[in-house]
Image (cartoon, rainbow, N blue to C red):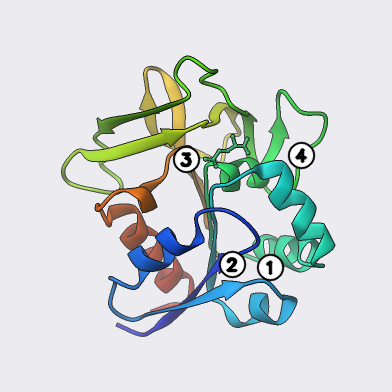
Amino acid sequence: MNNVTIGILALQGSVIEHRSRLEQIAGVTVVEVKKTEEIDRVDGIILPGGESTTIGKLLREFGLFAPLKARIEAGMPVWGTCAGLILLAKEIVNEPAPHLAVMDIAVRRNAYGSQLDSFATRAAIPEVAKEEIPLVFIRAPWIERVGQDVTVLCRVDGQIVAARQGNMLATSFHPELTADLSFHGYFVNMVQESRGN
Ligand code: GLN
C-alpha cells in the first residue's frame, strides 16, 4: 500500500485528536494545514470540529478559503466532522449563508438544542465498519436534506448524521474522540483510491 499525506485543517478545533488517530494507521503522513502551500502538499484533508463560524472566518483571513474550495471541487478527498460538516454544506438552514458550499446537503447547526447538547450512542454503519461503532455528538448539527448524488451512511433517531458524496465525507459526530479507527480507516481508503493506489 502506498503512502498518502493527509492534512488536518489546523486553524481551530480538534486537530490533535484527529492527528493521533491517523498516526495509528500505517502509511499515513499527517500535515497540519495553516498555509496555502500546505494545501498543495496533501492528498486529502480533514476539516475538524470546533466552531464553524470561527473556522469559516479564519479560512478567509488565512487566505485558505479559495484554494481549499478549488481543490475540493477538483476532487481532493475531504472529511468534515461536526463543524467541518457545516463548512462543507451548500445550505445551513438556520444561518444566512453557507461557507465552502461544496457538498449537496442542507444542515441544521446545533440541531440537538441545549437539552441534548452532547451525547454518545452506538450505530451500525455497514459501509464503514462490520460492528456497531461508538458515536460522540457535541453541539452537533444534523443533515436535513441531501441531494441525489449524496449517499446517506447513518441515521440516528431518524436524523441523518453521516453522508458521502463522491470524495466528500461528512459526519455530525466525532470519531476522533473514540478509540475506534473505522472512520479514519475509511477516509484513508478514500484518499488511497483517489490516488489510484
Ligand atoms: N456547534 C458547532 C458549530 O455550530 C459545532 C460543534 C462541534 O464541532 N463539535 O459550529
* Circle 4 or circle 3, nearest the eye: 4
Q: Quadrant of residue 4?
A: bottom left
Give the numbered dot on residue 98. Answer: 4
Horizontal side, residue 43 vs residue 4: left or right: right
Residue 73: give x, y in percent of width and height. 69, 60
Kind of residue sitting beneath label 4: Pro
Please report contact status of discs 1 and 3: CB closer than 8 Å, yes or no: no
The CA span between labels 3 and 2 is 17 Å
Residue drawn 44% across the image and 19% down it: 116
Kind of residue sitting beneath label 1: Arg
Q: Which of the two discs, 4 and 3, labels the residue nearer the N terminus? A: 4
In this rendering, the answer to whether 28 lies above or below 172 is below
Kind of residue sitting beneath label 2: Met
Horizontal side, residue 106 vs residue 49: left or right: right
Give the numbered dot on residue 71. Answer: 1
Please report contact status of discs 2 and 1: CB closer than 8 Å, yes or no: yes
What is the number of callouts on the image? 4
Q: Residues within 10 Å of mark 4 (few under 14, many from 20)?
A: some
Q: Label 1, secondary structure: give it.
A: helix
Q: Which of the two discs, 4 and 2, labels the residue nearer the N terminus? A: 2
Horizontal side, residue 29 vs residue 141: left or right: left
Give the numbered dot on residue 76. Answer: 2
Q: Label 2, secondary structure: give it.
A: loop
The CA span between labels 1 and 3 is 20 Å
Give the numbered dot on residue 163. Answer: 3
Residue 35: give x, y in percent of width and height. 71, 75
